[in-house]
Image (cartoon, rainbow, N blue to C red):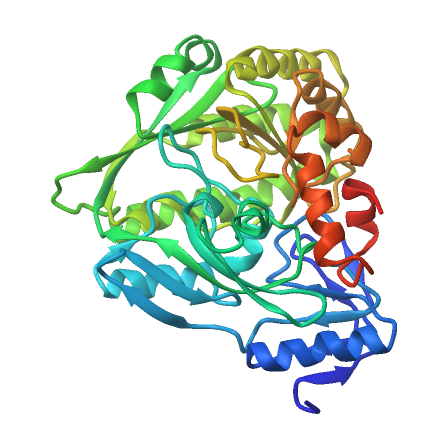
Amino acid sequence: MTDTYARTTSTWRNWAGNVSARPARVASPASVGELAEVLRRASEDGLTVKPVGTGHSFTATAATSGVLVRPDLLTGIRDIDRTAMTVTVEAGTPLKRLNAALAREGLSLTNMGDIMEQTVAGATSTGTHGTGRDSASIAAQIRALELVTADGTVLRCSPDEHPDVFAAARVGLGALGVVTALTLAVEPVFLLTAREEPMSFDRVTSDFDQLVAENEHFEFYWFPHTGNCNTKRNNRSAGPAAPPGRVSGWIEDELLSNGIFQVACSVGRAVPAAIPSIAALSSRALSARTYTDIPYKVFTSPRRVRFVEMEYALPREAAVEALRELKGMVERSPLRISFPVEVRTAPADDITLSTASGRESAYIAVHMYRGTPYQAYFTAVERIMTGYDGRPHWGKIHTRDAAALAGSYPRFGEFTALRDRLDPDRLFANDYLRRVLGD
């Protein structure tokens, strides 16, 4: 184990740079057996253990002063079952690599979020989602999972095996054990046509229910300090494939959405008074376009401008009222917001602590450029969202604690009771879990 379990003096930081930790040791187990040994040794030494993916969470869910488990060697596809239409993949596999591998096999996930840098287990454990009228988060596409618990037991969980663990561990926050493999539903690769179109705030909020009902995947971005939005509708297509042109795609996705936006955010951070004018220009820079491609190339976009984020899931029927209240708050305040506000939807699912557990949901996400003070804005947004029984995304900044969250999740006690059974000594605890789950 000397190659996979070493002392360290280095500091771990997440992608946004707002969370850091100095673990006592870092482990990179290459098998389930090696991982069980890592857990045993940590327990003997009185150290806690936290698995970490690529650090795309904005909360300290993976931070530890104990043993940091990196999944770099737990990667790759274990099995593709074309009869059951599933793929079993090691937990540390990046979504980007999984999507490319599935495409080569003529397969695809049904839905996913808008970035694919995360590991499969990291994305699912924190509830990463995209937008969908009928298709839900990545975790909702899990058909089975493998979990190593605090005592080294390997549990294979599904609706038929350990169903109570399966119900909770799909969005397990790293609190129940270390996920080592996931079996995901797949389907034959298909084409999506994306239609991106500017639309006024008043129109998109007035027509929100209709836009959601008429499209398989609908989302929009509102640019604060303006009445402008950009909408995106993704629907299955018979083809033919018509991806963005190399030059036009680069202009939209790299030059405008990343390069020029990076400059605009830097200027806005230095001169906040310029932000409303920049927002007005930015909201008019992206033109309407339509393109058709395989799913992951339509669902995802490069995100090179670093930021911090808060996102709340609301009952879907409350989304428009909450968004209008948010807009009014920004207009009345001295805040200067350079990042657009993102709105997506999801159907209800049956995962214990999924943000869409038991209810159709709409997600409202707010962002601030990295290095810009965000507390005043996020505090004001959180006050609005909690007024509509909002549930915070587990991987994004929020201040809610176990007492508040227990009132938002009917099955909260079910999760904490399972945690008591699987990890009574809190091998997988850290400050974040103590806050959101209690101790």
Say left or right for 422 vs 157.
right
Q: Which residue reaches farthest right?
A: 46
In the rendered image of this protein, does residue 326 appear above or below residue 24? above
- The reply to whether residue 64 is visible in this rendering is yes
Where's residue 5, x and y in %? 71, 83
Q: Which residue shows up at 70% across the image and 54% down it? A: 175
Q: Which residue shows up at 64% across the image and 12% down it? A: 325
Q: Which residue shows up at 12% across the image and 39% down it? A: 238
Q: Which residue shows up at 67% across the image and 52% down it? A: 16
In the rendered image of this protein, does residue 380 appear above or below residue 81? above
Out of 23 and 302, give the one closest to the viewer: 23
Where's residue 248, x and y in %? 30, 45
| Labels in figure, total | 0
Out of 130 and 360, give the one closest to the viewer: 360
Say left or right for 169 vs 360.
right
- The reply to whether residue 304 is visible in this rendering is no
Where's residue 37, x and y in %? 69, 81
Where's residue 70, x and y in %? 64, 71
Q: Where is residue 96, by image quadrant?
A: bottom left
In the rendered image of this protein, does residue 361 appear above or below residue 289? above
Out of 86 and 236, give the one closest to the viewer: 86
Q: Quadrant of the N terminus?
A: bottom right
In the rendered image of this protein, does residue 135 appear above or below residue 379? below
Say left or right for 307 vs 199.
right
